[in-house]
Structures are given as C-alpha cells and as structure tokens.
Amino acid sequence: MSFDLMFQKANELYLNGAYRQAERIYRQILAFAPENADVLNMLGLVAAAQNEHEEAVSCFYAALKSATNPLPVYFNLAVSLTYISKFNEAIEAYEHILKIAPNTKEAYNNLGGIYEKTGDIQKAKISYQKAIELDQNYIDPLVNIAFLEKDESTLEATALKFSASPVPFYYLALMNYETGDYKKALSFILKADQLEESYDIKNLTAQIYLKLSENENAIKYFHQALILAPKSLDALIDLGTLEQNESYLKKAISINFQNPQAHLAYADFLSHENRKAEALEEYRQALLLGAKNAALCNNIALILKDMADYKGALDLFLNAFLEDPENQNIAINMAETLVLLYNSEPDAAIKIAKLWEKNAPENVFAKKTLASFENNTEKQVEGYTEQLFDNFAHIYDERMKEIKYNVFNKIKELELHLEGNILDLGCATGLAPENLKTQNSRWTGVDISENMLKSAKDKKLYETLHQSDIEQFLKDNSKTYDNILCLDVLEYIQHYENIFKLCCPSRLILTIETAPKNIKTVTLSPQGRYQHNPKHIEEQLQKAGYKTINTHKLVLRKENGKDVEGVLFIANA
C-alpha cells in the first residue's frame, strides 16, 4: 500500500474516532518520512483528541518546521497550547495566523477566550467583536460576549435563533450552574447533549448531577465523557472518587504525575481505605506540587495524629487553622490532638494551646482547650457546647458506637421501664428513645444544637423537639413529665443546682463523669468535660427536694482505649 493510501486510511480512522489505530498508521508513515508535516499535524490532532495536549504541541511544533501551509498547524497548536495554559505561546500562534490570514474569525474568537481566561476583559471583548464583524452569524463570539456579560436573555435569544447548535444551550447551563440554579442548568445541558456528543457537555452534565446529589446519573455521564476523552484527568479523578475506584485514580497520576489534584484524590481514597502510610506519601506529593491549602494540611495532620506524631500534626493543624479560621472541624481536630499530647507532654501541650489562643482569641475551642489544661473551672466559654455538637452531629451515632457508650445498657439492666411523658434533656440525635422507647411513652427532646435536632427529627421518635438551653427550657416549661433524662449533660455544665430544682418532682435519671477522689465538688478534665464528685451531686439532689436517690457505678464509655468511670443516678421526690 502506498503512503498516500495509508495516509488516507489513517485519516478515515481518525474521523471515525479510532485514534489508536490511526496513530499506528501515521507512525508507520513517519518511520519512512520523519519530517512529513501533514503526518505530524495529524499525529498532533490524534493526541489532542485524547486530551494529550503536551504531546500534541510537540507534534505541531515539529510539523511547522517543514509545513508548506502553516496556517492550520498554527491553529491546532494554539488550541492545544490554550488547553495546557501556555497562554502567551498560544497568543503568539494566533498572531501568526492573523498575519497570514487577517480575516480568520476563529482566531479572533479564540484570542478572546484566552484574554478572558487571563482576566483581560477589555481585550477579550474587542477580540470577540472583531470576530462578529467578520461574520454577524458567527455563534461562538456572540455567545461568548453574552456569557462574559452574564446576559442570560441574549443567550436565550441566541438559543432560539440557532436552535440546532448546542453552544448557547451549553453556556446557558454553565451560567446557571455557576449561579447555583442546578435544575435550570440541567434542562439546558440536556438540550445541548441531544444536539451534540462532546466531552465538555458530558462533563458539565455529570457535574450538575453531582450538585443535585444524583450520583448514579453523574457516574453515567462521567463514563460517557471518559469514552470521548479517555485521558481526561477531571473525569478520571471524579469517577475514581465517586466509585472509590483505585485504578482510575492511579491512571490519572500516570497521565500527569505533576497534577496535584490527582494525588489529592488518590490520597483521600487511601486514607478512606485506612492505608495511612500510602495516603501520607500522596498528600506530601500534592503538597510538593503546590497544592497547599487548609484541607490538605488538615488531612496530613489527621494521619500524623493517627500515627501518634502529635507535634507534627499540631504544626499542620495550626497552619490549616490560620488559613481557614472559620473551619471548626479543623479547630476540633486540633483540640483533640492537643489532649492526646497533654497526656504525655503536658507542658508542650499547654505551650501550643497558649499560642493557639493568642492567634485565635475568639475561637471557643482554643479558649476551652486552654481553660481545660489549666483546670480553670470559672472560665465560661459561651457557645462551646453548641458549636461542638453542631460539628459532631453528622457522625455522632457512629462515634457513640466506636466509644462503646454503655449508659443505655445499664438502664436496661436495671429494668427502668420508662412510661408516660418523658423529657430528654440534651437529647442529641435521639439515641435515648431509639434504645429505650416503649409503646406507653411519649418523648420530648431538648438540645442546644440545631444539627443534632435535625438528626433527631429524621428519626421521628419525639412528639416535640426544642432548640434551647436546658435550664431556660425548664424555666419556661409548664408541662408535667413522669421521667426526665439528663444523660451525659452535666459533663458540659458546671452549675446544675437550679436544674435539679426545676426538674423536681419528676423522676430524674442522670449521669456524671466521676471526678478524681481529691475533688470535693467539680473539676475540668483536659478533654474539656466537667467531672463531678458523686457525693456532692447527691447532696444537691436532696436540697432540690429528691428524697430517694439510688446510685449505680458504671463505665460510661471508652476513651483512647481506657474506661471512663461514671455514676448513674435515679432520683425520686
């Protein structure tokens, strides 16, 4: 077969999307004609079609050395350079085109796109306008200007005029996606998808479905996008994350080892699989590649925390916190790690806690942690409990299983049948009725955390739920309760005497975390919880009007592998 026939065959394969087969034939021809500009140009197009734009650029530059007609090669080069963000080189390529053919409307349109990406909006508008002057019906610059100016009505008019083109529908979808109207965005992108099979359309469709929490549809469209662009990093990373598919994530890294997002996604996967050492290396690689941000520092620190490198973890947690001081999850992680360090090196932990509070004097977790280390029971940290449980609500039930929470088992063991109207103070996500509710019980829940109450509401176990400080609720309450539960509440309350008075004469079932024997009333543990002397609690119950008080020692839960001792009180008036 002659080279011309081989070239023709390869071109047919390229046009039909058989890129690998086309590439093999092009390379066979190139072995005998290594400087053939037409073949080099087509090899570049094959690479570009598979999102391999670095390889495409190399081919296009090689083709320009011997091209008799450099115009299409410059154009292809400029497109690929734009994909890999080499904007100055892309601009030079388009300027070469306009010197050769000043009326190339596509060059002006694409130049506008580059200027828009680099923030030179005035130049972008000028370039788009020049393209329109050359062709009043050239849809791309018409849409680009409308999108740049966020002119949705012009985009809709363009969509009506050019109803067979997917372009205005795509940009209408993108505009609504960016403004958060995902349902409207979906209606437009599905119209675009009906008109054309393209990677950009498939990928945006998948992203919109993600925002709508329709993961199955998102996965379907990511797969379709990947068929059209098998080496798309975005599709590989998103699919790998959604399906927890390690092969996709490793493929993304193999395609572009220098991409920090690929390493981040793989690190998150490894961390989820509890492959901590491997995850740490991937996070560090992402950090080396410039992906420094609060979330990354936080994730590395979590692994170091699990590996008992508390000082290393705290250094990163502090960096993460300073970058994102409003992120309370980072603050909670730092507080927990400080407690772990305090257990072995209290002086070092106190020093770091003081530094943290100095840098974040208004942060409730910084203030509470230092107060706990200094056993400052008089320092009131307003909002601490509410913010703590708001942040824990989504994992609260799982965490209670992990720490082997034992109070409900003890209540069942004592055969405390809870009947009638029951008030659950500090109800959290509703674990008490979930474990103790009977056919003859009607439950009311009170908690200070809005997020905890949302979880409790979903379980549909309470007749009513109230977001309130428990003492204030008791003051305002006029209803009579047969039983009042106050489980794991006094650990967050120092002064409880008035609460006991307000509960009486209802039967009161409460728990405390036991204070060390040398503590006569109350102390603050390094974990930030109040520990109470059982005898003092009993005295205060008697003063409140309770006459019969039964106490039962128990292990409340596990903490860092150790038993947390407590007491269950059953007080009757």
Image (spheres, rainbow, N blue to C red):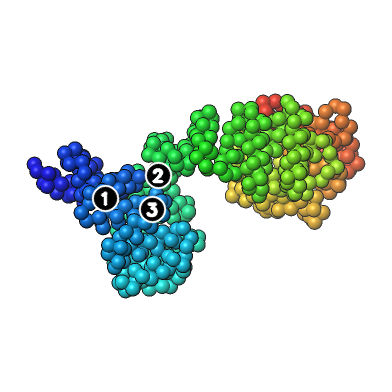
**Residue position marked by numbered label 3 in the rendering:** 89
Are there few (<14), some (14-19), or many (20+) residues within 10 Å of tag 2?
many
Looking at the figure, which quarter contains the N terminus? top left
Looking at the figure, which quarter contains the C terminus? top right
Are there few (<14), some (14-19), or many (20+) residues within 10 Å of tag 3?
some
Residue 12, horizontal then vertical, whole percent: 17, 49
Residue at 36% over, 67% down = 141
Residue 347, horizontal then vertical, whole percent: 78, 30
Which of pointers 2 and 1 lies earlier in the amino acid sequence?
1
Are there few (<14), some (14-19), or many (20+) residues within 10 Å of tag 1?
many
- Mark nearer the viewer, 2 or 1: 1
Q: Of all residues shown, which one is farthest toward the left? A: 1
Quarter-of-image position of residue 378: top right
Q: Amino acid at mark 1?
A: Leu
Is residue 441 in view?
A: no
Residue 222, horizontal then vertical, whole percent: 38, 48
- Residue 486 lies, with reference to residue 73, above or below; the image says above
Which of pointers 3 and 2 lies earlier in the amino acid sequence?
3
Towards the viewer: 507 or 346? 346
- Mark nearer the viewer, 3 or 2: 3
Could you say which disc has been placed on residue 233 in the image?
2
**Residue position marked by numbered label 1 in the rendering:** 64
Q: Amino acid at mark 2?
A: Leu
As drawn, is 190 to the left or to the right of 551?
left
Which of pointers 3 and 1 lies earlier in the amino acid sequence?
1
Residue 477, horizontal then vertical, whole percent: 79, 55
Residue at 53% over, 28% down = 277
Query: Does dot 1 land on a helix, a strand or a loop?
Result: helix
Towards the viewer: 353 or 478? 353
* Callouts 3 and 1 close, C-beta under 8 Å: no
Distance of label 3 from label 1 (alpha carbons): 14 Å
